[in-house]
Image: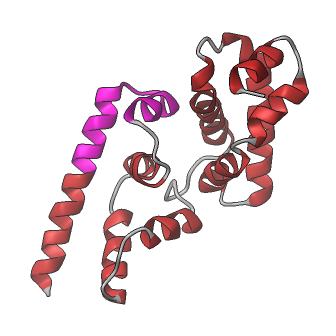
Amino acid sequence: MDIETLIEKSKAGDISAYMELLKQKQDLFYRIAMAYTKNSYDAEDCISDAAIKGFEKIKQLHTPNKFFAWFTSILVNVCRKNYKLKSTSCCEEEMQELMDSFSYSSVEDKIIIENLLSKLKDDDREIIVLRYLKDYSLKEIAYIMDIPINTVKTKIYRSLNILRIKNRRIENEY
């Protein structure tokens, strides 16, 4: 079944159609929840809570092709509400995945990049992960983070500048 049909059935109260929608991106939802909670049990709780909330509010979804961004924003809000971040918004696994996406000429390069990313604020790092690791569009990030799209653009621009400046400092040390 296509997404639009599943959403229409979900709006009519068909829970199995709704669960079929969620199963299409369950791995992504799990990784997002893990990035916030850093614990598989808590991540599963957040996904369950978000699923319930989403099903209760599915009638508010006006654009079917935005279902996954819509649900992701619910999930992120549930994670933020239930589990406050301590020092980073990305779990070690997510950070490792981001690190592995770079090509390194040495172990030193990997350490430098990890150090650079750790210098970003939590929400800035979260936006960088959503944009460059998860391949979300600027519009989807704005929706998920519940901030204006121009704020997303500004945060990406500033974060990349911070990373460039800090990288130059590190290069000058060597």
Q: Is residue 97 above or below residue 146?
A: below
In which quadrant of the rendered view does residue 46 lie? top right
Q: Is residue 114 above or below residue 55?
A: below
In which quadrant of the rendered view does residue 37 lie? bottom right
Whole-percent x, y for residue 148 in the image: 36, 24
- Residue nearest the observer in this picture, 9 or 61: 9
* Colour scheme of the picture: secondary structure
Query: Who's the residue at 30% across and 81% down the image?
Result: 109
Whole-percent x, y for residue 161 in the image: 19, 54
Look at the image and say whether residue 88 sits in the magenta stretch. no
As drawn, is 110 to the left or to the right of 86? left
Give the residues drawn in magenta, as a range: 138-159
Give the number of marks: 0
Name the image quarter holding the C terminus.
bottom left
Q: Is residue 69 above or below residue 60?
A: below
Look at the image and say whether residue 158 sits in the magenta stretch. yes
Query: Who's the residue at 13% across and 84% down the image?
Result: 173
As drawn, is 132 to the left or to the right of 43? left
In which quadrant of the rendered view does residue 162 lie? bottom left
Query: Who's the residue at 19% across and 66% down the image?
Result: 166
Name the image quarter holding the N terminus.
top right
Whole-percent x, y for residue 165 in the image: 15, 62
Q: Is residue 55 above or below residue 141?
A: above
As drawn, is 106 to the left or to the right of 145? left
Whole-percent x, y for residue 74 in the image: 64, 30
As drawn, is 11 to the left or to the right of 97? right
Q: Main secondary structure of the magenta part?
A: helix
- As drawn, the residue found furthest toward the front would be 1
Query: Who's the residue at 78% across and 42% down the image?
Result: 23
- As drawn, the residue found furthest toward the left would be 172
